[in-house]
Image (cartoon, helix red, strand yellow):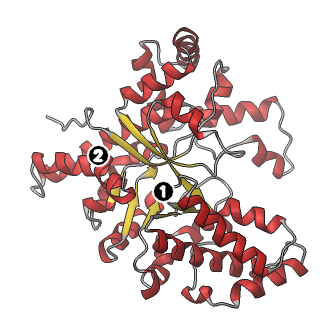
Amino acid sequence: MMLDFSDLAVVDVHCHPYTRKDRLSADEWVDEVSFGGGSAEYLKAGGIAVDDAALETLQRVKRDTLYFRYMLRRLAEYFQVDATVAAVVEARNRAIADQGYAAYARSLHQAGRIETLIVDDGHPLPPVNLERFRAETGVEIVPIFRIEVLIQQLLDEDSGWAKFQRAYDEGIALALSEGGYKGLKSIIAYRTGLDIDPGSRSSDQGMIALEKIRRARGRGGDAIKNLRDHLFCRAIERCIDFDVPLQVHTGMGDWEVHLAACRPALLMELLRYPAYRACKVLLVHTGYPYQAEAGYIANVLPNIWCDLSEGLPFAGNAGKRIIAEVLEMAPPSRVCYGSDTYGTPEPFYTSALLGKQALAQALQDLIDDRFMTEAEARDIAKMIFSENARELYGI
């Protein structure tokens, strides 16, 4: 008999808040719940006309992924309708009209046993009202502060280094001390990559880099990387000061990401630097498709955690393999469930289902190979789905 973790509580360690969306057309709903790679904006940026044929192609690609097919079938089971986009979207819209949006959203989170969402409110922008989001979802909301939003705000101002540095440090300190944020998040991987020299924290690097950027009117070349690397190191120090975790994007993302510069292994020199060893770091997405690197780092560096999000759910049937490869080296006490879902409540629900299915399959194989007992597997599942995240964030 296959392991069954459907009753386990879920803490989603990495996801995004969403705004209320009542009635949606089929195409609108597909755009909201699909992985964010294919978009009209991407085509426009390449000078490609976004006509009806192009939009039809985008819809077909989004609907054809294994992730989407799984989500559609699980939602069809939930609504007890045919597994077609039209039927599922109509059932969704009807449920919202009958129950009210908040009751509908809460019912999906309850069905997935989702108790807590640790949300990066740096996406979408402008930020979602978290009090309203908390009321609509009915779950515990734990916000984390994305440093790149603050960095961009400061770059848009015409200030010198002294003011910039002070505003950056004070902005982070205020978010953590009074803003209700329980940690920091960085997407430096998207901007300039994860190859960050620990020496970037030198007192002059930030000042020199900003001066070059100002003289170049925002186009600073290497200076942009030097500044972001310096500010990333300062963020590590603030996390140590406030004893909160730092989430770092690694691996896959949307079409803008430079995948080769997002490998977790690129962070090794920085993470093992003596001054930074006290920082608790969560490797977001476990660096998928480089998840074995993240698992290894979590083994040899004691303050590193792996987050399973984005591979779960968007890599579909790869979930079992991703988990198995992470657990080849990572202690189960250093692995957290996450989804990186957004947009509407439905993907949060189906991601929790897929995560439990994939973990059950991976751990069943380990039971069959005599690495653990069924009781041990269940304890590990509890750790991954909630206990590790609660310990990491003190919630």
The residue to which callout 1 is attached is 182
Q: Nearer the viewer, residue 124 or 76?
A: 124
Q: State which quarter of the image contains the N terminus.
A: top left
Looking at the rendered structure, the kind of residue marked 2 is Leu
Identify the residue at image location x=40%, y=48%.
318
Q: Estimate how packed mark 2 is, as few (under 14), some (14 to 19) or many (20 or more) residues with alpha carbons within 10 Å.
A: many
Q: Secondary structure at mark 1?
A: loop
| Structural distance between the alpha carbons of marks 1 and 2 | 27 Å
Horizontally, is 346 left or right of 24 in the view? Answer: left
Q: Estimate how packed mark 1 is, as few (under 14), some (14 to 19) or many (20 or more) residues with alpha carbons within 10 Å.
A: many
Q: Residue 289: in sight, yes or no? A: no
Looking at the rendered structure, the kind of residue marked 1 is Lys
Above or below for 176 versus 278: above
Where is residue 175? Give x, y as percent. Answer: 59, 59
Horizontally, is 10 left or right of 25 in the view? Answer: left
Horizontally, is 111 left or right of 20 in the view? Answer: left
Quarter of the view holding residue 166: bottom right
Q: Secondary structure at mark 2?
A: helix
Q: Nearer the viewer, residue 391 or 28?
A: 391
Where is residue 176? Give x, y as percent. Answer: 54, 61
Where is residue 149? Give x, y as percent. Answer: 69, 59
Looking at the rendered image, the disc whose residue lies closer to the viewer, 1 or 2, is 1
- Residue lying at the far top of the rendered structure: 98
The residue to which callout 2 is attached is 359
Where is residue 51? Give x, y as percent. Answer: 84, 33
Identify the residue at image location x=31%, y=62%.
334
Instruction: State which tag comes first along the sequence, 1 or 2.
Output: 1
